[in-house]
Image (tube, rainbow, N blue to C red):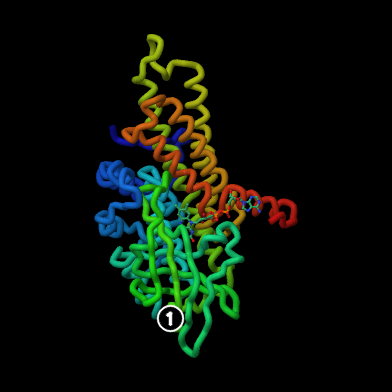
Amino acid sequence: MAFEGVDFLRLDELYSDEERLARDSVREFVSREFLPRIQEHVRRDGSFPMELVPRMAELGLFGANLHGYGCAGLSNVAYGLVMQELERGDSGLRSFASVQGSLVMHPIHTWGSEAQKERWLPRLAAGRAIGCFGLTEPDFGSFASGMLTKAVRHGDRWVLNGTKRWITNGSVADVALVWARSEDGVQGFLVEKGTPGLVTSDIRGKLSLRASITSELSLQDVEVRESDRLPGAQGLRAALGCLTQARYGIAWGAIGAAMACYDEVVHYCRERIVQGGPLAGKQLTQEKLVEMLAGITKAQLLALRVGRLKDEGKLHHTMVSLAKRENVDMALRVARAARELLGANGIVDDHQAMRHMLNLETVRTYEGTHEVHTLILGKHITGLDAI
Ligand SMILES: Cc1cc2nc3c(=O)[nH]c(=O)nc-3n(C[C@H](O)[C@H](O)[C@H](O)COP(=O)(O)OP(=O)(O)OC[C@H]3O[C@@H](n4cnc5c(N)ncnc54)[C@H](O)[C@@H]3O)c2cc1C
């Protein structure tokens, strides 16, 4: 059955033609080309349907809200709707596009030299190159300011040493944006695949985001040129600026995961007969479905307002923290309730809810954990930094 979305408050009327078109074309791509493949990739831990990358590029999904250099130049609301539809497929699919666009292309676009932009952005937009973002380390996740990876300058070259862990697409990336501490503070370096001293290995045994490649990057005396340093990215603030972009996409993406679970479970409950009648007709079931619809609808309003503010240049990073925190929390609750209503059937991968539920555990953790966003907002309210 074709997925029709969830739109209780007729929000469709608030989107432009361009925004609806972007959403609908990704919705169709996910239904026709991605979903038939997902089960196979989930069963093979750490694999992604790489054959879809050229198609994703053709649809303009990489760096979709950036302008120039072969990027689609969509509004931020259209970009958000694209992320929503991708995550309706799987958080791994949305993560692929988020990392490529928000965590690699955005920083090059914002802080790169003209030569870096011309070299990388058209290739990344066309999916001819894949990027990854190396900030997290084995001992420093939530508070990257403690990072141990070092960059030491020798004339016009830099030598990088350290380990980055939990890096999406690390082993398949043609270019890694590696954040390292230098004498002048934290800086970002573009490290190309095959650079001597760069070794990648994939993390296995994940129970979440299985249809996504997650790697460790080991850097031992990796030499890069001064021209590989992002000249405009000074300090950790730049790395955190990338995260704000990605978190914005996640606030929308989580709605997609919740919609997938809700859509699946409403159909299921209508068909499933318990005690002589449809499960959908039971009072406790209806309460669960109402909570789901209410959560999705409130999340849509939050995302839309945040998106319009971003398009108007009025967005503050704390607003993104609120949207990421609330919408992911909502999606996880929807996925858990949907899994519950599916009963035993809900634990097999013919149904989507448990896959989304497990994925959302990662989404709650990465790009600022739920607690980190709580502390960001707590500081905003009180002026007191509890971190
Ligand atoms: C599948 C996957 C993909 C990822 N992809 C990337 C990527 O591409 N690039 C990248 O750089 N990173 C990536 N990450 C890493 C991710 O961003 C980190 O896991 C995240 O920042 C949390 O860090 P941590 O795992 O070290 O947890 P920790 O920082 O050790 O936190 C553990 C727990 O303690 C809580 N906590 C921490 N500090 C406080 C405090 N002061 N008060 C109260 N509670 C606190 C946290 O909220 C959390 O619940 C990925 C992670 C996963 C799982």
Q: Label 1 neighbourhood size at 10 Å, few (<14), some (14-19), many (20+)?
A: many
Q: Is residue 46 left or right of residue 310?
A: left
**Which residue appears farthest toward the bottom when viewing the image?**
155
- Secondary element under disc 1, as helix, strand or loop, is strand
**Split into 4 quadrants, where in the image is the N terminus?**
top left
Q: Pick the residue in front: 205 or 85.
A: 205
Q: Pick the residue in front: 296 or 265.
A: 265
Q: Residue at x 40, y 48 (%)?
A: 205
Q: Residue at x 54, y 41 (%)?
A: 329
Q: Quadrant of ligand 1?
A: bottom right
Q: Is residue 370 visible?
A: yes
Q: Is residue 379 left or right of residue 187?
A: right
Q: Pick the residue in front: 29 or 233.
A: 233
Q: Is residue 73 visible?
A: no
Residue 116, given in percent of the width and then of the height, sits at 40, 77
Q: Amino acid at mark 1?
A: Glu
Q: Quadrant of residue 355?
A: top left
**Split into 4 quadrants, where in the image is the C terminus?**
bottom right
Q: Is residue 125 left or right of residue 336?
A: left
Depicted 307 relative to depicted 119: above or below: above
Q: Is mark 1 within 8 Å of ligand 1?
A: no
Q: Residue at x 60, y 75 (%)?
A: 185
Q: According to the image, label 1 marks what residue?
A: 223
Q: Residue at x 52, y 78 (%)?
A: 151
